[in-house]
Image (cartoon, rainbow, N blue to C red):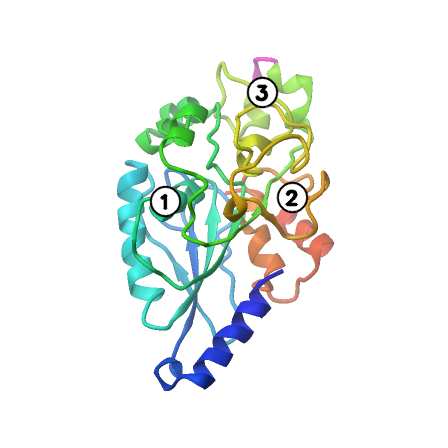
Amino acid sequence: MTKAWWLAAAVGAAVASPKLASAAVYDLHVAGVCSQSWTDGKGSAAIGAWANETSVDVKIDLRGSISQAAANLAGYLDQYCGDGNLCHVYAYSAGEAVLGYLLANTTSTWNLAAVYVGGGAAGGSRLAGDIAAALTCSLASQLTESGVRAAYNHNVTGGVTMYRLGGRDELAETAAACVAGTILKWITFGFVNDHCLQGKNDGVVEYHSSAAYSTAGVYADFWDSGSHWGSGYQRSYVTPSAADEGRPLNHYEIKVLPLCLEGGIAGVSGLDACVTWADSTHWQ
């Protein structure tokens, strides 16, 4: 966990410098592909809430292109994450790719404490074409494994650390997930027609994406099978190990797990309790 450390640092800086005495802390929520805000589309609409901090639903259009969504996101960072303010960013699915693209292609300096990623799509998904066709969303077509990996330098994050969690839907990692028919459509939330996920995955993205592997492929665990992108992309909520993942959560349930683990869900705390709570949210 990192949030308490950053808050302590921010308070210390505010005390030391009169200019920062009125600094605010913002929690930006960046949603996934084909959405226009954190609260629309599939996945829980829950927004984290923290004492003495302001939560922001980042309302950008994630239907057109990664570059355009990144330009719109920059406006939010300019508004909330400068002038001595401090931001925590919660990025879900394609929201991570949009933020990653922005950080790799900007010289702007924002005060980002950290990024907390659930079901990250920075490595793309073999379901991208199916999602784009099903939802009439051109940004999804950019999230192919080769496309999003070539879109920007994933090793460059402007010094920002991304803490990662990936869901593991038990059914989706079985051989049954590669059998065409109603079970395949049910497992993958109706998106898949002819493509199938391989290895462990959350029903939409595989571990090579959610765990920030530098090479697309089939990986049996979240951290230990191969090389990852640079240090900014590969940090963990707990000591990195094969078991460090979102447990049996699917892509939509993993969306809100980072909010809970960072203390943003009232009355729920700790990994096991947060996983149980996230599992109960299902998808809309």
Residue occupying image coordinates x 46% and y 41%: 155
- Residue 166 is a magenta residue: no
Q: Which residues are magenta?
A: 179-183
Q: Is residue 169 left or right of residue 69?
A: right
The answer for how far apart the CA atoms under marks 3 and 1 are is 36 Å
Q: Is residue 175 something one can see in this rendering?
A: yes
Number of residues whose C-alpha sits closer than 10 Å to that of mark 2, classed few (under 14), some (14–19) or many (20 or more): many
Proximity of marks 2 and 3: CB atoms separated by less than 8 Å: no
Number of residues whose C-alpha sits closer than 10 Å to that of mark 3, classed few (under 14), some (14–19) or many (20 or more): many
Q: Earlier in the sequence, mark 2 or mark 3?
A: 3
Please state which of residues 80 and 134 is positioned toward the viewer in this rendering: 80
Residue 36 - label: none
Disc 3: which residue: 184
> Residue 194: x and y, percent?
49, 14
192, above or below 254, in the image:
above
Residue 104 - label: 1
| Amino acid type of the residue that numbered disc 2 sits on in the rendered structure | Gly
State which quadrant residue 212 falls in: top right
